[in-house]
Image (cartoon, rainbow, N blue to C red):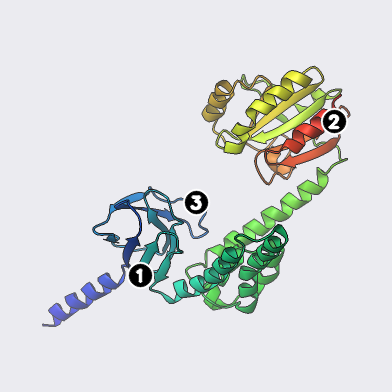
Amino acid sequence: MKKFLLLMAMGLMTASAYADVKVEVKGFSTDTLVVQRVNLQGNRRVAADSVIVMKEGKAVLPDVAKTMCLFIGPKDRSARPASLYINPGENFEVTIVKGENPVIKGSAVQDMINEVKNRQNDIIAKAQNVDDAVRDSLYGEYAKVAPDYARQNLDTPITLWALWQCDTETAEELLPKIGDNARNSMFGELEQALAKRIEREKQRAEAQKLTAEGMQAPDFSLNHPDGSAFVLSSMRGMWVVLDFWGSWCSWCIKGMPEMKKSYEKYGDSMEIVSIACGDSKEAWLAAIKKYDMNWTNVLSADVIPGSDKKVEQLYGIEGYPTKIIIDPKGKIVKRFVGETPLFYEALEELIK
């Protein structure tokens, strides 16, 4: 009898180690769900997507036995997915209705997150069909929701989740003040991640100061596709465009036709130096051939010789594409983040 009770207790403990996730979908023609497991920052997939067939718009996820974040939504991607932050042993009920925000019930942590998200969603709803001045004001309110929560709730299970949405200055101010309930929560791993992000962004800000307009462009050496060295300072006497890009960057690719036009027009007095970042050598070489990039191409793979930084860190790059115009004396004239016509207008004004 004692053995039976022990086995039964073990069975209950095992059962409680799994989260129960029930999903109901309304208003969609699809009969399948896509379940994507991502890290707790919500910015990186950590497992292959699963596709689950629903029956009459309902489905139960297979046993969820780990603390995790799941994005769940209809296969046709016609609605924003529900974001679930799950601890083992919880029972979730998710309702996804076309044209509405997902409704998620089942845990105290999720309820706290929902409260913050509902405030954000209310502001987004107000920002529809209003003039630009009102919309800008509402976006300012939206940006304050997570920081306000974190500042007023330094010791809850979602404090670090809220801090992750804050700007670097706010995160740096508040991170040392969080309590044990925050530190020991499912989001506890974000404490170290936040500290690293703060340090990384401080280094980027410092690099941007050193590469601001009017500053001498830091020299560097990287390899051409054939393995020979390219040295930036060898380009003195010409205008140079440093083009920080990647084959994975859709906006970088969209800008290629205009880049080619500029190179054809100004190639006698200007050189484009495309610096591939975040690419494998194979993907980089394939992209050069595919897009017929007939200017200087180099790959940022390791720290540059004589430095402890990659070239994108040396120049404080925060988004792709970034284009930096350098004059014939080696001084930085302009920096443009994103694919923008302002870059081409500046190029035409500078190189006459």
- Tell me the residue that label 3 is attached to: 44
Res 340 → quadrant: top right
Question: Which tag, 3 or 2, sits closer to the chain's start?
Answer: 3
Res 169 → quadrant: bottom right
Q: For this view, does 282 lie left or right of residue 203?
A: left
Image position of 291 with respect to 194: above or below: above
Res 294 → quadrant: top right
Please tell me the numbered disc located at residue 349: 2
Image position of 112 with respect to 310: above or below: below
Amino acid at pointer 2 = Glu
Q: Secondary structure at mark 1?
A: strand
- The residue drawn where x is 86% and y is 22% is 237
- Closer to the camera in the image, 27 or 53: 27
Front of the two marks 3 and 2: 2
- For label 1, count other residues whose C-alpha is less than 10 Å away and answer few (under 14), some (14-19) or many (20+): many
Q: Secondary structure at mark 3?
A: loop
Question: Which tag, 1 or 2, sits closer to the chain's start?
Answer: 1
- What's the distance in space between the residues labelled 3 and 1, CA to CA? 23 Å
Amino acid at pointer 3 = Arg
- What's the distance in space between the residues labelled 1 and 2, CA to CA? 59 Å
Q: For this view, does 189 lie left or right of residue 230?
A: left
Q: Is residue 321 visible?
A: yes
Q: For this view, does 187 lie left or right of residue 7?
A: right
- Closer to the camera in the image, 76 or 309: 76
Q: Position of residue 151 (x, y in %)?
A: 65, 75
Question: Which tag, 3 or 1, sits closer to the chain's start?
Answer: 3
- Tell me the residue that label 1 is attached to: 92
Q: Position of residue 78 (x, y in %)?
A: 43, 51
- Closer to the camera in the image, 14 or 115: 115
Q: Position of residue 141 (x, y in %)?
A: 66, 68
Verify CB contact (< 8 Å) between mark 3 and mark 2: no
